Amino acid sequence: MNPQPLIAVVGNPNAGKSALFNALTGARQKVGNYPGVTVERHVGRAILPSGAPAELIDLPGSYGLDPNSPDEAVTRDVLLGRQQGERLPDALLIVLDASNLDNHLRFALQLIALGRPTVVALNMVDLAKRDGLELDAAKLGAELGVPVIETVAVRRRGITELLGRLESELGHQRAVHGKDLPPPDLVHLQKRAREVAQAAILRETPVRRITHQLDAVLLHPVAGPIILAAVLFIMFQAVFAWATVPADALDAGITSLGNIVGNALPEGAFKSLIVDGIWSGVGSVLVFLPQILLLFFCIGILEDSGYLARAALISDRTMARFGLQGKSFIPLLSAYACAVPAIMATRTIENKRDRIATILIAPLMTCSARLPVYALVINAFIPNKQLLGPLLSARTAMMLGLYVLGFLAAVITAKLLKSTILKSGKSPFLLEMPPYRWPTVQSIGLRLIDRAKVFLRRAGTVILGISIALWVLASLPLEKGAPPPIAESFAGMIGHTVEPVIRPLGFNWKIGIGLITSLAAREVIVGTLGTIYGIESGADDDDRKGLQQALQSDLTLGGAVALLIFFAFAMQCMSTSAVVRRETGGWKWPAIQWAYMTGIAYICAFLANKIVTAWWT
Amino acid sequence: MNAAQPAQAFTIPLDSLELSKRAHIESIDWAALEETAARRLRQFGFDEGVTIEALHLGPFGRDPLAVRVGRMTVAIRRAHARAVHVVPIAK
């Protein structure tokens, strides 16, 4: 058995729980999933003052032990020792927002009544003081019957003391007194919470001034939506324009490294595998890491600062027109980065039908995996002309158009779903507006490291595997001991088999191979085409410009536009389908989603090819 | 309940409360709310006697409302706010 004590970090949403968890565990943490549910399981290790390690688990923020969502159910089940794959925590670390005591204490009282060894962190005391609230931690501790430590997680204040108290509480089974065993009824619990809060508050002024003043501007009926639009514009500008600097540098680095490796290796099959198979396959996807991280960085800032909740409020009425609600805005915005975390973020939507509708449309939002494909095709086919001076080039306009297209498809689909198979009454949009805070470097940094790991793992497994398999299929069967022309290889045969189906879209058999490999993940097609054209043109041409030129001579403009449209709509992502299956509890919804999206993609790509070909030739 | 309490006459639904005006929650029509909404409101601390203040309105159709309840600010749709009856605090 695991000898390390398990400490559950638990509290309301917006109590600064994750910041405290980060401060306690530093970089020693892991993100996984609970079996059967898509709730992320965050565990980390803290070193207690005696030098002994303890395992910390960051439970999803919750308003009580009566769950409203799958997230909150996990919190309850872990605390009661009912969660599959998790042992009963040895101690609880309850995190309270010092500025929000009367509300957070209700859940804390429920938790203390569980009778486990418990320490309370009175967090964000600095913000409380800023807003004119002075608290007596000792008095609060006396009222609650458990130790209370003042902390400021983001400044690491109170962390050492907290660890010390946790260690001394561990193993002391608390005697549960009748006095602090609150009646289960919520109304009484709330009353007791207010009494305790009143007892602990030394002095208060009623307003959170800074948050209120900021909201007066950011939630202003006129300025609010304009600011939101501007924020989103700057975010996308950052991802498309500013990320090209690091991306180009990375590209140059990968290319020259590939050349060095290529020159060092003797001619032959092994060199071909490394340079044409692996390097051009994996390298062409790696280039997009800066863009993807920048997108996650922007969304992380918006989320941690508290602005996303305001965006949800501003957009609620608009979302309601499509049958959704403000809470759907947050997952849909994250879906611009990646549908997988977006679908996990739908857990906060209580209404089941709203949640399924949001899950179904999320992959239509332009996720970052489409970027490599769009960038490749646009750069190959759209001239770099300025439309509106330096502000907008033809390429940016095309890219923006594809984003709008994905968004329109998503909202129209939502409207369709919500007025037919997912009809429901008005959905409860009830959302806490947390106070504004500075995002911390640590919290954003840890998240970026996480996302980079996921991306690199995918590049190192799925994309690497497909690159190697494709190289093998493209190099066999041997003709007189040498690889055949690609058209006669196994890969070529597969491509030729599907060609009749995709010829109406303007695609040839090489694109066909790419479409098949990209069923696993969209960005794979870039590596696949890299490999196919790389092998075709000989080993030296591993330059990405080469791939663009090869595409230009191999595809018509109609086919290129059709390819973009196809990628805008088609469901080509195994990870998303897997998450949808887990989240909706079966294959029904992912199957419907796959058929719907891929069907629309085929029809629209067909129309795009016909229209563009008719107009431009 | 108390016949001597004149406050009843001034009870208004929360969605009619003027911005920046504080009020007490007089009663909540729990039966008019669907279960999830009712539970969430309770968890947000909506309760009889609690001080409440309407702070901001959504840009389109003045919906939803941002209200402060206790020390917390929450967004609530007009349709739900209508089930919360409040008595404005005279200045």
Image: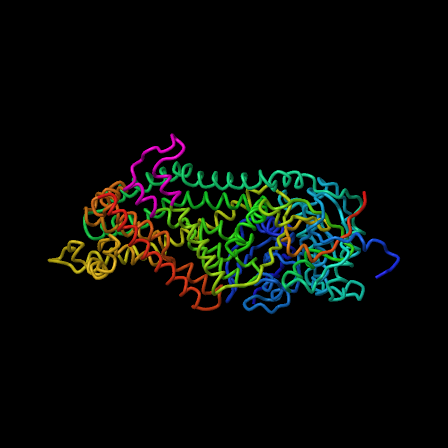
Q: Quadrant of residue A176?
A: bottom right
Relative to A358, A400 lies left or right: left
Q: Is residue A351 above or below residue A329?
A: below
**In which quadrant will I find the N terminus of chain A?**
bottom right
Query: Residue A438 in the image: x percent, y percent?
Result: 60, 41
Task: Report if residue A264 is visible in the image.
Answer: no
Query: Who is closer to the viewer here, A448 or A210?
Result: A210
Task: Report if residue A410 is visible in the image.
Answer: yes
Q: Is residue A451 above or below residue A491?
A: above
- Residue, far front: B9
Q: Total of numbered circles in the picture?
A: 0
- Residue, far right: B4
Query: Which residue appears at 75% of the width and 61% of the height?
Result: A189
Magenta-drawn segment: A373-401
Query: Residue A234 in the image: x percent, y percent?
Result: 48, 38
Query: Residue B48 in the image: x percent, y percent?
Result: 77, 57
Q: Is residue A100 above or below residue A579?
A: above
- Residue, far left: A480
Query: Which residue appears at 62% of the width and 47% of the height?
Result: B62
Relative to A540, A253 lies left or right: right
Relative to A560, A85 lies left or right: right
Query: Who is closer to the viewer here, A557 or A96?
Result: A557
Relative to B61, A563 lies left or right: left
Query: Residue A23 in the image: x percent, y percent?
Result: 60, 48
Query: Is A545 included in the stretch rendered in magenta?
Result: no
**In which quadrant will I find the C terminus of chain A?**
top left
Query: Is A376 included in the stretch rendered in magenta?
Result: yes
Query: Which residue appears at 39% of the width and 50% of the height?
Result: A369
